[in-house]
Amino acid sequence: MSRKLRVVALVDPELVPPDTIVGVSDEDMADWKMEYDVRVTLEDLGHEVVCLGLEHLGQLAEVQRDFRPHIVFNMLEEFHGAATYEPMVVGHLELLRLPYTGCNPQGLLVAHDKALAKHVLRGAGIPTPPSRVFERTSRAAAGSISAKSLNFPLLVKSTVEDASLGIATDSVVHSERELRRRVQRVHDDQCTDALVEEFIEGRELYVGTLGNQRPTALPVWELRFRRLPPGTPNIATADVKWDGDLQKEWGVMTERAKLPAAWERRLQSLARRVHRTLGISGYARMDFRVTASGEPYVLEANPNPNLSYGEDYAESADAAGLDYESLLQRILNLGLSYPAAWKRQLV
Ligand SMILES: Nc1ncnc2c1ncn2[C@@H]1O[C@H](COP(=O)(O)OP(=O)(O)O)[C@@H](O)[C@H]1O
Ligand SMILES: [Mg+2]
């Protein structure tokens, strides 16, 4: 039995889980399932847990003074409605000298900017689809939207959104005209720059990583469609990720990927390199596409991915011999041992 810890479960204010789920439908639970699963499991592990829905930064110093936590279990995805503020909140924890789980501010910052992360990955020789960025500037710039040296089909997405927000089957474009329309759609609807990548035909694979400077990689997971309508791209659109009816209709599922051992080793090695290259700590999930001949491409890195019981990350950890309790305890231990700068100072 590990040491009993005082843990602050840090969550978005609207995702504070209730004390009991008796009488709550699966649908109502979906929003805060991770927060609930983590809190209950930390308690089962014998830790003392206080759940904090973060509305203003002052709450952090208050809980530090009143509860004297050993660690903060960070489940935030945004602050004041902005995902871009998440690294700053983690930075605030670090300046308060509060250990926390998951990724450090710099890793979050770099990974959440897909265009920047791709530059860093390319610089390290890690394969990622060829791409261009179209900034959200004035309308006059519309004429300059062109594939240039990129080969169609292309996939158009936001440089910063995640959870497949704005990604639909129409995000795959086959002509300059479709490209212009979709880029403008990202500019107008998502109000961000647009990242245009060559569309990688192939399988969609996810690899979890766990660790600080020397991460391990979990078994490879695959997104599969049992009944994909003919002509539909096999991509994780927002509907594929979030629409239960569509998931049933198309037979969407994830499972351990059946791959040649050499492919699995290569993907795991790449996932570990992505983790280190982007300066990620704690736990992350890397998204890949792999062509029929086995050429892997990194799409993006997701630090602090969904940790719900039964979801891909926890399932792939389980396949590696780490049950849910052991996984959460490992994540706490990694947070406690993260070499934050304040721990190296002699003041
Ligand atoms: N270059 C690409 N080639 C093929 N599919 C892609 C490409 N980029 C994104 N996708 C599809 O879109 C999904 C979401 O893109 P991703 O970059 O992972 O963003 P998000 O942060 O929204 O998950 C991917 O899971 C994949 O199915
Ligand atoms: Mg993704």
Image (cartoon, rainbow, N blue to C red):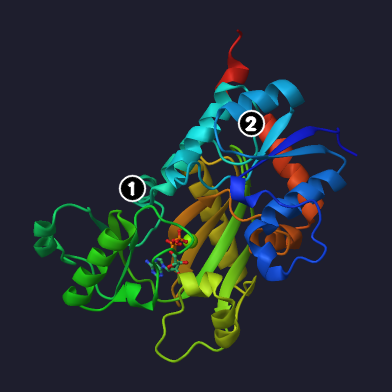
Ligand 1 within 8 Å of disc 2? The answer is no
Tell which of 271 and 141 is nearer to you: 141
For the point 19% across and 69% down, which residue is it? 180
Quarter residue 317 falls in: bottom right
| Horizontal side of residue 140 vs 331, given as left or right | left
Image quadrant occupied by the C terminus:
top right
Where is residue 226 shown, x and y percent of the image?
58, 86
* Secondary-structure class at tag 2: loop
| Horizontal side of residue 186 vs 95, given as left or right | left
| Horizontal side of residue 48 vs 258, given as left or right | right
* Label located before the other in sequence (1 or 2): 1
Vertical side of 10 occupied by 290: above or below: below
* Residue 338 numbered tag: 2
* Secondary-structure class at tag 1: helix
Which residue of the protein is positioned furthest toward the top in this rendering? 347
Which residue of the protein is positioned furthest toward the front in this rendering? 23
Where is residue 299 shown, x and y percent of the image?
43, 60
Tell which of 247 and 107 is nearer to you: 247
Ligand 1 within 8 Å of disc 1? The answer is no
Residue type, numbered disc 2: Tyr
Residue type, numbered disc 1: His
Q: Is residue 143 visible?
A: yes
For the point 76% across and 47% down, which residue is it? 39
Residue under numbered circle 1 = 119
Label 2 CA crowd tier, 10 Å (few <14, some 14–19, many 20+): many
Quarter residue 164 falls in: bottom left
Quarter residue 66 falls in: top right
Q: Dividing the image into four equal quarters, which quarter contains ligand 1? A: bottom left
Vertical side of 21 occupied by 273: above or below: above
